[in-house]
Image (cartoon, grey):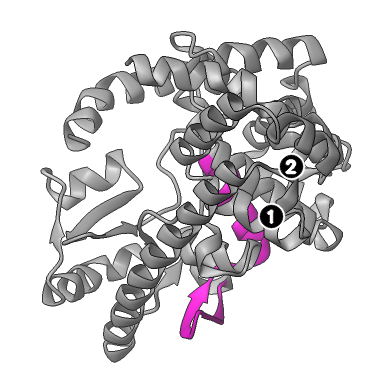
């Protein structure tokens, strides 16, 4: 618990330097990092805690400014990048084996997040820490996929029957040694969401990821997945630095190709617009310079949807946004739940009933 409290406090301390790194304000970064060894040591621990050290190392190397940080910090980041590469290589081997087995049974797997985001956002295998393999499978094909996993030696870690499990969580976990696979039957299970898993699978495209030919989500669905992850974090009262940095990297790389009108209409149709906008507003507060007020581009896109007026009514002013961000970053009890209930399309009573009834089971499942 003490480590978690320190982590919350570290957010306030290190967000400015992360913002400066993402904006490539290297002189400012150098002033903060080159002379203060104690600060650098704490920053390295913070980056390691948030699985961000490999990505920061990648950004430093890509910009050719490794001389802007202390040697000790650079060495720590380099070691983290090497560890991330070894981890990713083992996951890539497992993903290739899994893809080959699925192809042999005419089963379409869509890999989400993980190695796909590593290649999409940064390129090098060692540039992003990946904990597991996430694949999306049609609910109708989940039985076939489970039989493939068993044949490959994986075991399901959930203690509940699959039919009950899928009503509580969006993915079932499977383990084999150090390899973990999250088999997604949907992108997220929450009251108010109207996510069409089959559409995401149908819209996926084949792509080569580190030599593996596999389906990946469309760019718009990649953004949807990032928002769902960020909203899930905020709902739990947590802000993962890795989620913020990945989203910022995606927007920098692909914003010119984003049709904000289509994105807004799609998000409203799937019941996630108000949450996505509120999450972006929190993101703007956490990383004010690097995000560049991106939430305004989503909110200012006109919408012909009938829900547009009700959507805009739930947006917050700058004072409310900052207050919500401070509450969540500080780990105030139930701050994330309050934030979620305000901005979700779900009926608050239905959401509370779903959360209170399912929370003990989800906690038990995660042990």
| Magenta region includes residue 215 | yes
Q: Which quarter of the rendered picture does the C terminus lie within?
A: top left
Q: Residue 176: where, in percent of width, then height?
A: 17, 63
Disc 1/disc 2 C-alpha distance (Å): 8 Å
Quarter of the figure with the N terminus: top left
Residue density around tag 1, few if under 14, some if 14–19, many if 20 or more, within 10 Å = some
Name the spot of residue 184 as percent of width and height, x first: 36, 57
| Quarter of the view holding residue 258 | bottom right
Kindly identify which residue carries mark 1: 59
Residue depicted at 58% across the width and 71% down the height: 203
Side (left or right) of 262 relative to 178: right
Identified at 25% across, 22% down, the residue is: 357
Q: Residue at x 57, y 42 (%)?
A: 73
Q: Earlier in the sequence, mark 1 or mark 2?
A: 2
- Secondary structure of the residue carrying tag 1 is helix
Q: Is residue 20 among the parts visible in the rendering?
A: yes
Q: Position of residue 302 (x, y in %)?
A: 88, 42
SS class of the residue under badge 2? Answer: helix
Q: Are marks 1 and 2 in contact (CB under 8 Å)?
A: yes
Marking on residue 21:
2
Q: Residue at x 24, y 32 (%)?
A: 362
Question: Which range of residues does the magenta coloring cover?
Answer: 204-229
């Amino acid at each position: 618990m003490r480590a978690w409290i320190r982590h919350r406090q570290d957010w306030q301390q290190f967000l400015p330097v992360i913002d400066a790194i993402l904006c490539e304000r290297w002189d400012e970064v150098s002033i903060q990092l080159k002379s203060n060894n104690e600060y650098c040591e704490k920053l390295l621990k913070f980056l390691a805690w948030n699985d961000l050290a490999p990505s920061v190392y990648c950004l430093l190397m890509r910009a050719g400014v490794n001389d802007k940080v202390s040697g000790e910090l650079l060495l720590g980041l380099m070691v983290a990048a090497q560890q991330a590469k070894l981890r990713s290589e083992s996951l890539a081997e497992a993903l290739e084996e899994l893809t080959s087995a699925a192809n042999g049974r005419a089963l379409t797997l869509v890999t989400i997040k993980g190695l796909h985001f590593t290649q999409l956002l940064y390129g090098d295998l060692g540039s992003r820490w990946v904990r597991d393999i996430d694949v999306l499978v049609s609910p109708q094909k989940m039985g076939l996929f489970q039989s493939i996993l068993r044949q490959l030696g994986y075991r399901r870690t959930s203690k509940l029957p699959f039919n009950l499990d899928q009503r509580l969580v969006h993915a079932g976990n499977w383990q084999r040694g150090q390899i973990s696979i999250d088999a997604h039957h949907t992108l997220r299970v929450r009251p108010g969401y109207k996510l069409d898993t089959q559409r995401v699978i149908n819209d996926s495209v084949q792509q080569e990821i580190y030599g593996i030919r596999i389906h990946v989500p469309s760019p718009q669905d990649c953004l949807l997945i990032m928002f769902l992850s960020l909203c899930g974090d905020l709902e739990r009262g947590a802000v993962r630095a890795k989620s913020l940095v990945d989203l910022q990297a995606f927007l920098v790389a692909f914003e010119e190709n984003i049709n904000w009108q289509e994105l807004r209409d799609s998000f409203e149709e799937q019941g996630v617009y108000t949450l996505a906008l509120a999450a972006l507003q929190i993101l703007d507060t956490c990383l004010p310079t690097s995000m560049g007020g991106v939430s305004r581009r989503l909110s200012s896109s006109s919408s012909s949807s009938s829900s547009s007026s009700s959507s805009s009514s739930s947006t917050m002013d700058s004072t409310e946004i900052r207050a919500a961000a401070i509450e969540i970053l500080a780990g105030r009890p139930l701050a994330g739940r309050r934030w979620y209930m305000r901005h979700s399309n779900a009926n608050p009573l239905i959401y509370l009933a779903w959360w209170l009834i399912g929370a003990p089971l989800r906690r038990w499942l995660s042990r």
